[in-house]
Amino acid sequence: MPVPFTAADTTRLRDTLDQVVADGATPGGVIAYGTTGHSPAFLTVGKVAPECGDTEPDQDTVYDIASLTKVVATWPLMGSSQGEPKSRHQWILKVERR
């Protein structure tokens, strides 16, 4: 049975995403998280892109992750191949091919 994310877990996720944006690595970001059998929850930070003005990301925002596609797409597949998740750290990632 999957273990749900705790408040401390989501705080660590948000703090990490906040730091990535504050460091200038990306103008904003979206993290979808959750457990099997439930709808994901979303954390959003920053802006979509400089050329989008003050537009903030939401759960439908898709970022171009370029050369990270293989890693981001493969990691959840590897977890799925191992059967039922054993921890609350199962990530739900949305990747769109362009």
Image: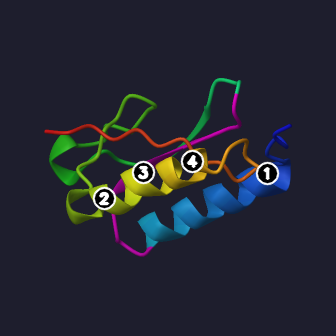
Q: Secondary structure at mark 2?
A: helix
Q: Secondary structure at mark 1?
A: loop
Sequence-wise, which precedes: disc 3 or disc 2? 3
Q: Locate residue 19, reporting x and y percent.
A: 53, 70
Image quarter of residue 92: top right
Sequence-wise, which precedes: disc 4 or disc 2? 2
Do the numbered discs 3 and 2 sit on residues whose CB atoms are within 8 Å? no
Front one among 8 and 28 = 8
Please state the extent of the stretch shown in magenta in the rendering: 23-36
Residue corresponding to mark 4:
81
Residue corresponding to mark 2:
70
Q: Please name the residue shown 46% across and 31% down the image.
A: 59
Nearer to us: label 3 or label 1 = 1
Sequence-wise, which precedes: disc 4 or disc 3? 3
- Local crowd size for mark 4, using a 10 Å CA cut-off: few (<14), some (14–19), many (≥20): few
Sequence-wise, which precedes: disc 1 or disc 2? 2
Do the numbered discs 4 and 3 sit on residues whose CB atoms are within 8 Å? no
Q: Please name the residue shown 57% across and 47% down the image.
A: 81
- Local crowd size for mark 3, using a 10 Å CA cut-off: few (<14), some (14–19), many (≥20): many
